[in-house]
Amino acid sequence: KAQHGMCVKWLANATRAELNGCTTGSKEFNMIPKAGPGEFRDRNVRIHADTPASIMLVFQAIFPFLVFAGDANEEPITLTIMGGTNVMFSPSYDYIDQVVLPCLELLGVPKVERKLEFRGWSTGGQQIGSIKFKFTPLARHQSLDATLWPKPTEADSIKRIDITMVVPRNFQESLKASLKFELDLVFPGVDIHNAIEEDSRHPARLY
């Protein structure tokens, strides 16, 4: 799809690659990079999708490249992506913020500052959103370290459940009650905390 092609074309440009066959609807393309991430110099990256294409898909495609794009001055990279923050069949901003990036930090990936500037939706009327990321890439020749991942112990248990709810305001109270009832059955005695409650302003926008 167009958003997949956008990711490939950005990476091709960043690596000065030869690229053939990358068009919407294509089932095959050839890409031969000529430069690695260590040669990438842009510290202010902006990607603007014309539709609410998944920002998270774009981020997941280019972040592994940028995290190794450290320069001699250890300058941070600011990455702004405009598109969809809440898109069907794609991880939402909240999932990346609360699950993916904290887990990556446990593997030695640099801490990523992130700011949801405004949400972008593919349902309930298309709307373009924006997320800004800022991070300092790994130093040159530095690798990730899987040994940083904590080893599970028998004592590990769920102590609290945080709920993020982005739904129409008139759904929130009934949904909170239903969630609490179901979670109490499966996790009795565990603290249930409504961390984020946001009005999505449309019945088709349920996250």
Image (tube, rainbow, N blue to C red):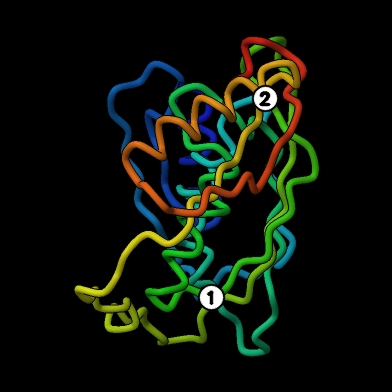
Residue at x-position 41% and y-position 74%: 106
Q: In the image shown, does 109 or 154 lie closer to the viewer?
A: 154
Q: Is residue 192 left or right of residue 112?
A: left
Image quarter where the C terminus lies is: top right
Q: Nearer the viewer, residue 35 or 99?
A: 99
Kind of residue at disc 1: Pro
Image position, residue 42 (x, y; %): 68, 65
Q: Amino acid at mark 2?
A: Gln
Residue pictured at 34% horizontal, 82% vertical: 148
Q: Earlier in the sequence, mark 2 or mark 1?
A: 1
Q: Residue at x 50, y 21 (%)?
A: 88
Where does the image place residue 172, in percent across and percent down from the top left? 67, 24
Q: Which residue is mark 1?
A: 110
Mark 1, Cα crowd under 10 Å, few <14 / some 14-19 / many 20+, is some
Q: Quadrant of residue 41?
A: bottom right
Q: Position of residue 5 (x, y in %)?
A: 48, 31
- Relative height, residue 44 to residue 56 (above, below): below
Q: Secondary structure at mark 1?
A: loop
Q: Position of residue 16 (x, y in %)?
A: 50, 56
Q: Nearer the viewer, mark 2 or mark 1?
A: 2
- Taking the view exactly as shown, the residue that stands out farthest to the front is 189
Q: CA distance from mark 2 to mark 1?
A: 35 Å
The circle drawn on residue 172 is 2
* Numbered disc 2: secondary structure: helix
Q: Quadrant of residue 156?
A: bottom left
Taking depth in this image into account, of 92 and 165 the one nearest to the observer is 165
Q: Is residue 144 above or below residue 159?
A: below
